[in-house]
Amino acid sequence: MAPNRKKPPLDVKRLVLHEAGYKCSNPVCRSILTLDIHHLVPVAKKGDNLPDNLLALCPNCHSLHHQGKIPEESLRAWKMLLLSLNEAFDRRSIDLLLALDRVGRPLYVSGDGVLDCASLIATGMVCITEGRKTEKTTHHYGSHFIYTVELTNKGKQMVGAWKRGDQKAAIQSVESPNTHST
């Protein structure tokens, strides 16, 4: 750190870390162990220590950016998409989007799992189908249904654009009316 450079205040750091879910802002990484606070506009170019100018990155992603391997546009897109996603969904739903993308196939869930996906289903990012009726013998009597949960085309396009740091494509995927089916 430059000798005359002031560190961001602790309350600002907390806000930026909270915004990123205390994880690396890179949706492909999401590391939780150690996080740096990156200035989108460098201090040397009159960048300030306000939350709008700061992004949480793990040391590896931070280093990759400074080596030119993660473009500035991707960092800005991740920042804006994190802000938007945080307003639309809880952290668990955001992690579920990334988990469904990583798994790449439908997952089986109980009725409680359906409820966990409610906000993603309502926005058309995830679809749910009723699966099979099962008999449950441990601690419960009767039967229950197993459902499948998977990303819709809309969800796949949005997560793919988010991971690439393509804010324009992410916004288009959400606004497009023809991306709801799987």
Image (cartoon, grey):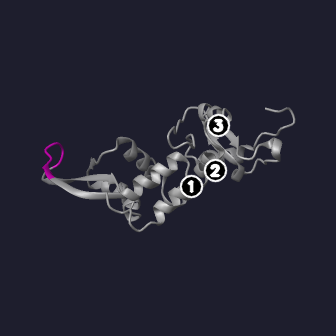
Identity, as a three-letter code, of the amino acid under mark 2: Arg
Element marked by disc 1: helix
Percent from the top left, x then y, of residue 78? Answer: 58, 49
- Is the Cβ of the residue at disc 1 closer than 8 Å to that at disc 3? no
Would residue 16 be counted in the magenta stretch?
A: no
- Depth check: 65 or 17 in front? 65
- Is the Cβ of the residue at disc 2 closer than 8 Å to that at disc 1? yes
Give the residue at mark 1. Answer: 167
Query: If the image is split into quadrants, where does the N terminus sit?
Result: top right
Give the residue at mark 3. Answer: 65
Magenta region, residue range = 133-140
Give the residue at mark 2. Answer: 76
The Cα–Cα distance between marks 2 and 1, rounded to whole angstroms, is 8 Å
Q: Quadrant of residue 104?
A: top left
- Depth check: 109 or 54 in front? 54
> Badge 1: few (under 14), some or many (20 or more) residues near its Cα, within 10 Å?
many
Circle nearer the N terminus (2, 3): 3
Residue appearing at x 15%, y 47% in the figure? 136
Identity, as a three-letter code, of the amino acid under mark 3: His
Q: Quadrant of residue 157?
A: bottom left
Percent from the top left, x then y, of residue 58? Answer: 60, 35
Q: Seen in the image, is 74 located left or right of residue 160?
A: right
Q: Which mark is residue 42?
A: none
- Depth check: 74 or 11 in front? 74
Farthest residue in the bottom direction?
177
Residue appearing at x 50%, y 61% in the figure? 88
Element marked by disc 2: helix
Circle nearer the N terminus (1, 3): 3
The Cα–Cα distance between marks 2 and 3, rounded to whole angstroms, is 12 Å
Percent from the top left, x then y, of residue 38? Answer: 69, 41
